[in-house]
Amino acid sequence: MTIVHIVLFKFKPEVTEDHKATFVRELKQLKTLPCVLNQRLVVGGPSVTDPIERSKGYHYALVSYHKDRAALDEYQASAEHHRVTSTYLWPFKEDVTRFDFEVAAEDEQDCLGWL
């Protein structure tokens, strides 16, 4: 069953735009990991939510797809994921919100259509 992995990123106020751009560029490279289903990993931002206050100050979002929980666990434990987060995120983050869910069986075909 497909797992959808969603993460919202908020940086400390003093973090530069150059640093954020580097983080996004590095994060996008994780799509090449074999545990990312069909290389479906998207990073976006800044928010275009209106009104912007509903974005709660988050700067970027990531959405990725994984074949199952084992693939998501492999993604989280990978050396590349660790390198990107430990170098460009954890020392600079103000907040991170993660939400993972299994696609319901009746929605699986819709999800596969996106892939």
Image: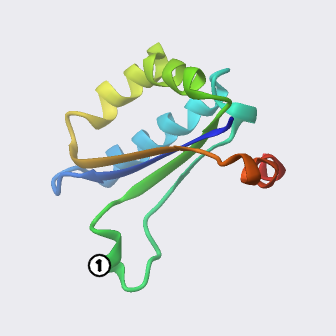
Asked if 31 appears above or below 82 in the picture, the reply is below
Residue displayed at 47% across by 75% down: 48
Percent of width and height locating residue 9? 34, 50
Asked if 65 appears above or below 54 in the picture, the reply is above
Residue nearest the observer in this picture, 59 or 97: 97
Among the 4 quarters of the image, the one containing residue 59: bottom left
Among the 4 quarters of the image, the one containing residue 36: top right
Percent of width and height locating residue 14? 16, 53
Q: Tell me, what colour scheme is on the image?
A: rainbow
Q: Is residue 31 left or right of residue 43?
A: right
Return the residue at label 1: 53
Residue displayed at 75% across by 47% down: 108
Percent of width and height locating residue 77? 44, 17
Number of on-image labels: 1
Q: Is residue 108 left or right of residue 31?
A: right
Residue displayed at 72% across by 46% down: 105
**Dot 1 alpha-carbon crowd within 10 angstroms: few under 14, some 14 to 19, many 20 or more:** few
Looking at the rendered structure, the secondary structure element under dot 1 is helix
Of the 4 image quadrants, the one containing the C terminus is top right
Percent of width and height locating residue 84? 40, 28
Residue kind at label 1, given as amino acid type: Glu
Of the 4 image quadrants, the one containing the N terminus is top right
Q: Residue furthest bottom?
A: 51
Residue nearest the observer in this picture, 84 or 110: 110
Asked if 105 appears above or below 60 in the picture, the reply is above
